[in-house]
Amino acid sequence: MSRWSTLLIDHASLGLLPKVPTAEVMRHAELVAEAKPKPKQLYERWESQQWSAEAVELERDRRAFDRLLPSDAKESLSESIATFIIGEYTGLDLLAPILTGAPEEQDHLYLGTQIADETRHTRLMLRLGEELLGLDRDPKMMLAQAWALVTPTHRTLSVLETEVVRELLNHPGDYRRWLRAVALFHLVTEGMLALVGQRAIVNALRDAPFLEGVRSSFVAMCRDESRHVSYGLHALRIGVQEGYADDICEIIEQAAPLAMQIGDEGATDDTEEGRTLWRMSRDSLRRQLRLIGVDDMLTQHIVQRAITPSARDQS
Ligand SMILES: [Fe+2]
Ligand SMILES: [Fe+2]
């Protein structure tokens, strides 16, 4: 199974996604990124990886969530879902100016697929909010409820994203501002936070067959995220080659410490699992900076600055 499982996660239907081994989900995005796919190839992957947010079966999960899950696990899953309700909705909201500012036609086509993905993710998170957590079914009310559940650092990062994207909205053809928005959104929010958070949920539910609908949801989102992160790396690699490394690194340096801190807050206690997630965020920051062509000294500086406020002995 493991020999061909990368192939399986790439081609699995929604019904088969829960069967993909956790280890394969954990390394899938890196394998896709290492192949350095171009926007056209990412578009083709998207066409072959369609799934339906409405088709995810949640009835059994809802009963299990209410009756079987221990209260601490329930609380932790609820907080994670609340984070994704806000994250997916704001992601959808922020991508429109990034789509408008796309430098090439193929980028424009790819970004259209990502907007479709974030719409699907938002719809699925609204379902989880309503059907699992029992939040208000009106999205406006649910978003306010979920906003109250996310940490103050997460709110600070969301506000920073809004500022950076508003700058782009006011200067739609400005490539430098476009790269800053892509660096913040694709590399930090998606590459460091979303991907790590999705994998944490998939991993936490590996022995919880009664929550198969939730697990399928997050495996599907992980697979989509591998395309989103790969696109960000492609766009930023070109930005670095064209002389915009300082602009890209400046916003990453500002946002990465927040992402590390959010990861720290998500790890409620000093468990091995919490330390693993923290290392995954740190390592993905380092790997992504190298993949876009930032030199070793600057990479080391950004990573060190990102981990300093919350550095752990075990790192
Ligand atoms: Fe998403
Ligand atoms: Fe995404």
Image (cartoon, rainbow, N blue to C red):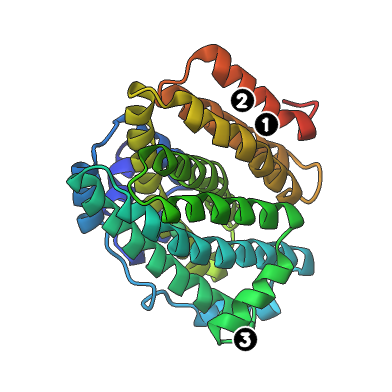
Q: Residue 293, image x and y in percent?
A: 41, 21
User: Do we see residue 12 in this rendering?
Assistant: no
Q: Residue 221, image x and y in percent?
A: 43, 57
Indicate if the residue with disc 3 has its beta carbon within 8 Å of ligand 1.
Answer: no
Mark 3: few, some, or many residues within 10 Å (few <14, many ≥20)?
Answer: some
Q: Which mark is residue 302?
A: 2
| Residue underneath mark 3 | 136
Q: Residue at x 50, y 63 (%)?
A: 88
Is the residue under label 2 in contact with that under label 1 (CB below 8 Å)?
yes
Image height check: is 140 above or below 231?
below
Q: CA distance from mark 3 to mark 2?
A: 40 Å
| Residue underneath mark 1 | 306
Figure disc tally: 3
Going by the numbered disc 2, the residue's amino acid type is Ile
Is 260 or 252 nearer to us in this picture? 252
Q: Is residue 2 left or right of residue 83?
A: left
Going by the numbered disc 3, the residue's amino acid type is Asp
Q: Residue at x 58, y 58 (%)?
A: 205
Is 237 or 291 nearer to us in this picture? 237
Q: Residue 87 is drawn in which quadrant?
A: bottom right
Q: CA distance from mark 1 to mark 2?
A: 6 Å
Q: Residue 6 is drawn in which quadrant?
A: top left
